[in-house]
Image (tube, helix red, strand yellow):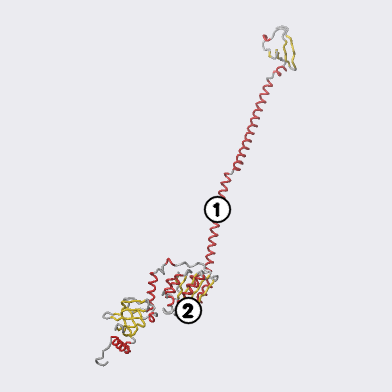
Amino acid sequence: MPDGVVLSVSQLNRYVKSIIEQDRNLQTVFVQGEISNFTNHYKTGHFYMTIKDEFSSIKAVMFKTANMRLKFMPENAMSVIIKGRVSVFERDGQYQLYIDDMQPDGIGALSFAFEQLKERLAKEGLFDSERKKPIPAYPERVGVVTSPTGAAIRDIINVVSRRFPLTELILCPVTVQGEHAAPQIKSAIEAFNKQKAADVLIVGRGGGSIEELWAFNEEIVARAVAASEIPVISAVGHETDFTICDFAADLRAPTPSAAAELAVPDMFQQKEMLAAAQRRINSAVYDKIGIERAKVEMKKSALQRLSPQNYIDNMRVRCDRAVMSMDNAVKHEITVKSKEFSSLCAKLDAMSPLKILARGYSVASKQGKIISDISDVEKGDIINVRVFGGDIECEVKGC
C-alpha cells in the first residue's frame, strides 16, 4: 500500500480481511478451547460464543447451516475442538472464528448429545416409572416398528409363531438408520395409536454402532414412544448400552427376540400352568366335597337324633311297653284276685246258710227280718221259715 494513502475505516477493515483470507493456514484451522458467553440466537438460528483458554480468547460464530448438523447443544464451560476458518467482521473491525464443525473434547459428540437429551427428558419426567404402562398378558395383536428386511423382524416372527401363534403380527416397515429413520419411526408409532391397531408395540432393530442406532436416540422418537397409549417395548439390539428410546419405553428388551418373548406368553408353559391349576382345582374341589359331605352326614345324624318321627316312634314303643306292662299287671292282678275270689267263694260256700239248711237247719224271718230272739215274735204272727228247698209260711201259735 503506497505511503501517505488515507483509508477509510471500512477500507482498512476490508484490506485486513483480504490479507487474512488469503492466508491458507487460516482457511481451515482446528482450535481447542472452552466455550463462554454462549448465545443461541433463536430468530436467526446462529450460535454466538467466545472460545478461550487460560491466557486468551476469540469471538466465534456458527451459522445455522452449520449448527443444524450438530448432535448436541453447546454449553458454557464446555471444552470443544473446533474446525473453522478465521476472518474479519468488517463492521466492528474484529477478527473472529467462523465455525464449520464442533466436537466435545474428550467425548464423542453423539455420546455427549445422548447425555444431554437424557438429562433434559429425565427432568421433564418422561422416564418416570409412574408413566410406564403394563404389558398385556395375552395380546391379540402385536405391532412391530422396524425394518422389513432386517434380522430383527425375522427373529420376532420366529419367536411369536413358536410361543403364541394365536397372536397376529402387524408390521409397519420403517428405515432404522439414517436421517429419515427417526421421522418414520415417530410416524409409525403415531399411526398405530391413531388406528388402535395393536395391543402392544415392539420398536427396534438389530445391533450396530452408536451412529447406526442413533435414530433411537432422537428426541422425536423418545416423545412419540412416551406419548403412545399402546404399551411400547424398546428392542434395540444391544445388550449393555441403552438408547433414549429404552428409557422412554414402558419396557426395555436387550434384543428383538427378547422383546418378542416379553410381548407374548409361552403357549406350552401356559398349557402346563392351566393343567397344574386344573389339578389344584380338582383336588381342592374333591377335598371340599369330602369335608361338606362329612358335615352333611353329621347334620343328618343330628337331625335323625332330633327328628319328631324318632321321638314319636320312641314314645310309641314306650306306650306299647307301658300297655303291655299294664296288661300283664292287670292279668296278674286278675289272676291273683280270681284266686282270692275262688278262695273266698269256697269259704263263702262253706259258710252259706243254704249249706246249713241242707243239713236240716232253717231260718225264720218276720217281715224280711231274721228272727234271732224269741222276743222278736208274738203269738199270732205270720213268719217265714226257710228250709232247704223253699220257704214255709207259718203262724205262731204260742211262744
Residue 93 screen position, x and y as percent:
29, 84
The quadrant of the rendering that contains the C terminus is top right
Observer-nearest of 206 and 348: 206
- Between the C-alphas of marks 1 and 2, the distance is 65 Å
Residue 276 screen position, x and y as percent:
53, 63
Observer-nearest of 13 and 139: 13
What element does badge 1 sit on? helix
Quadrant of residue 130 within the rendered picture = bottom left
Res 212 seen here:
yes
Q: Residues within 10 Å of mark 2 (few under 14, many from 20)?
A: some
**Mark 2 lies on residue:** 175
- The residue positioned 69% from the left and 9% from the top of the image is 377
Observer-nearest of 172 and 76: 76
Say the numbered circle drawn on residue 328.
none
Q: Residues within 10 Å of mark 1 (few under 14, many from 20)?
A: few
Residue 105 screen position, x and y as percent:
33, 79
| Amino acid residing under circle 1 | Glu
Residue 207 screen position, x and y as percent:
45, 78
> Height in image: 234 above or below 334?
below
**Mark 1 lies on residue:** 292
Front of the two marks 1 and 2: 2
| Amino acid residing under circle 2 | Thr
